[in-house]
Image: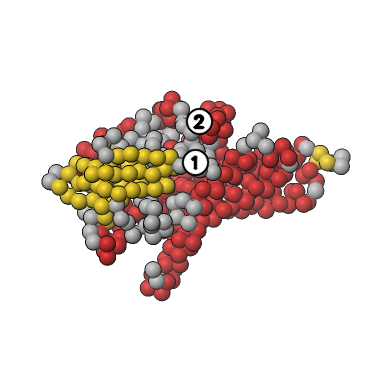
Amino acid sequence: MMSIYETDEIAAVRDMARKFALEKLAPGYQAREKSGRFEPELIREMGELGLIAPELPEEFGGMGVGAIYSGVIIEEIARADFSFGYIPLLASLNGQVLKNFAKPEIAAKWLPRVTAGEIMLAIALTEPRGGSDAGNLGLKMERDGDYYVLNGEKTSISAADQAAATIVFARTGKPEDKAHGVSAILVPMDLPGISTTRFSCLGQRAIGRGSIFFDNVRVPADHLLGTENKGFVQVMQGFDFSRSLIGLQCIGLAQQSLDETWAHVAEHKAFGQPLASFQGVSHQLANFDTQVQAARLLSMHALWLKDQGLPHTAEAAMTKWWPPLLAYETVHCCLLMHGHYAYSNELPFEQRLRDVLGLQIGDGTANIMKTIIARDRAGRKAVGN
């Protein structure tokens, strides 16, 4: 077992995920960035292996296991292809939302296709003027009989042009209601009035980010998630889960870089000695290896708390701000240890740097996460908005 959080069964799932990742995903990591797409057959194979949202109930194609299972899967997938880690990440986040807040017939329609690897779901919260002010939404959603009509724009949405449906946060109340006037709804992306654009991003090009435009888009009212005007407060709880998964996604990338670099410095020589014999080399790697091990335990602990039904908001926020920064610094160090060869794109270090950098921005910045931690520890009243 790798840690106190892993049973033999979880370790077996980790081994299966690592085998799939290193054999099937790693060889195409850099090619997927150039194409800006994932191979559908690989996503389906991942689904067939049970590696997509296994925490969902069996009726939805999951295995009904704990959140830790998804954590170890995402870590191993990200070892081979960081962007591919978004497949299970988005499935777990959106799957949890639909399981908890969608009408049973809606969940039954979409979730089995997600766990089978047939489709992807996106989640759309960010808007051009909002950024970190997630509760200050301008996209409007108005009831019209048996439909809701959406008008506005979402931006910086992962898989915006690849998703079959998107969980959209929109304003149904008054602007002054802030987060308490926001609802969530599942929007099929083939509805009339929807258009998308894709950004030219520094990294994560296979999953892609872009804008979604809604022009009088009519969505069946039964696609509402949770209660009208309470969607933000209800659905946002799921982000504690995804933040912990993001931590492990980053740790997977960092650990793979460390493994490769330890092997390199043990074999490569300078001045007649292995590079590892120089403390300026080995001590730097030992430092990062120590922190990566600690960050993994922190992320696993947050998932363990979730599985026990215990509060874990602060711990999840910790896993969102620290591992992305740590992974970036770790890969940077590993790139330098490989010298000029790693400065080219012959090795994947430069792509890993670009890919992991995005998670210091998206899904909640470090400062937002630290504010969440402070509110949990000192109380919202003391910390303020």
Q: Is residue 191 above or below residue 381?
A: above
Q: Give the residue displayed 45% in from the left and 55% down from the top.
A: 364
Question: Residue 119, relative to residue 310: is it above or below?
Answer: above
Q: Which mark is residue 28?
A: none
Residue 359 in view in this figure: yes
For label 2, the SS is helix
Q: Quadrant of the N terminus?
A: top right
Element assignment for label 1: loop
| Residue 18 position in % (x across, y down) | 54, 34
Question: Foreground mark, 2 or 1?
Answer: 1
Left or right side of 141 for 261? right
- Frontmost residue, 242 versus 347: 347
Q: Which residue is mark 1?
A: 200
Q: What's the residue at 37%, 73% (across, down)?
A: 381
Q: Residue furthest right?
A: 272
Residue ranking furthest to the bottom: 382
Q: Position of residue 307 (x, y in %)?
A: 39, 50
Q: Residue 147: horizontal and vertical position, in percent?
A: 17, 44
- Looking at the image, residue 275 lies above or below residue 47: below
Residue 318 placement, left or right of 309: right
The residue singled out by tag 2 in the image is 35
Label 1, residues with CA under 10 Å away: few <14, some 14-19, many ≥20 = few
Along the line of sight, which residue is nearer the eye, 139 or 328? 139
Viewer can see residue 222: no
Q: Position of residue 94 (x, y in %)?
A: 35, 43
Q: Residue furthest left?
A: 145
Q: CA distance from mark 2 to mark 1?
A: 12 Å
Q: Amino acid at mark 1?
A: Ser
- Amino acid on which disc 2 is placed: Ser
Q: Earlier in the sequence, mark 2 or mark 1?
A: 2
Which residue is located at x 45 percent, y 65 percent?
371
